[in-house]
Image: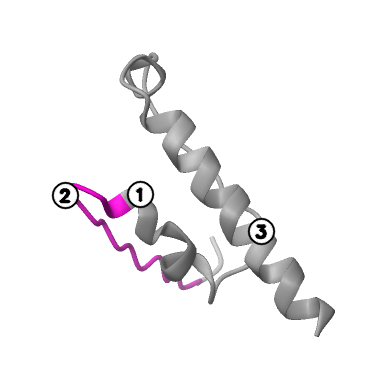
Amino acid sequence: MENFTVNNPTRLVFGKGVCEQIPDHIKNYGEKVLLVYGKGSIKKNGVYIDVKKQLEKAEDREAKANAR
């Protein structure tokens, strides 16, 4: 096997209202997001919809910033 290095820094943010912070957290990263979740509780409790809305908000912010 060849030698290699993997750097995978991870930031986990927990608490009330943290979904609204998503656009601020992801602005310095690439254009794609991978959502990883279990069997569906994220959809049952509404977090999936909240995250999707914030990702769309971040996308809108990026589009407006690029239009300037």
**Position of residue 19 measured from the top left corner of the image (x, y, whole percent):** 35, 49
Q: Earlier in the sequence, mark 2 or mark 3?
A: 2
Q: Secondary structure at mark 2?
A: loop
Amino acid at dot 1: Cys
How far, Cα to Cα, is label 2 from label 1?
A: 9 Å
- The image quarter containing residue 64 is bottom right
How far, Cα to Cα, is label 1 from label 3? 15 Å
Highlighted magenta segment, given as a residue range = 4-18
Query: Where on the picture, by quarter, is residue 20?
Result: bottom left
Mark 2 neighbour class, 10 Å CA radius: few under 14, some 14 to 19, many 20 or more: few
Which residue is at a point 46% across and 73% down the rendered structure image?
5
Instruction: Give the quadrant of the C terminus.
Output: bottom right
Query: Residue at position x 54%, y 60% from top?
Result: 1
Q: Which residue is mark 2?
A: 15
Which quadrant of the view contains residue 66? Answer: bottom right
Secondary-structure class at tag 1 = helix
- Find out whether the residues at labels 2 and 1 contact each other: C-beta distance under 8 Å: no
Q: Which mark is residue 19?
A: 1
In the image as oriented, which residue stretches furthest toward the left?
A: 15
User: At which x and y percent is residue 21?
Assistant: 36, 61
Task: Determine whether label 2 and label 3 are within 8 Å by CB.
Answer: no
Q: Position of residue 65 (x, y in %)?
A: 71, 78
Disc 3 target residue: 59
Residue 1 within the magenta-colored segment of the rendering: no
Identify the residue shown where x is 42% and y is 71%. Answer: 7
Question: Outermost residue toward the right?
Answer: 67
Residue 14 part of the magenta-drawn span: yes
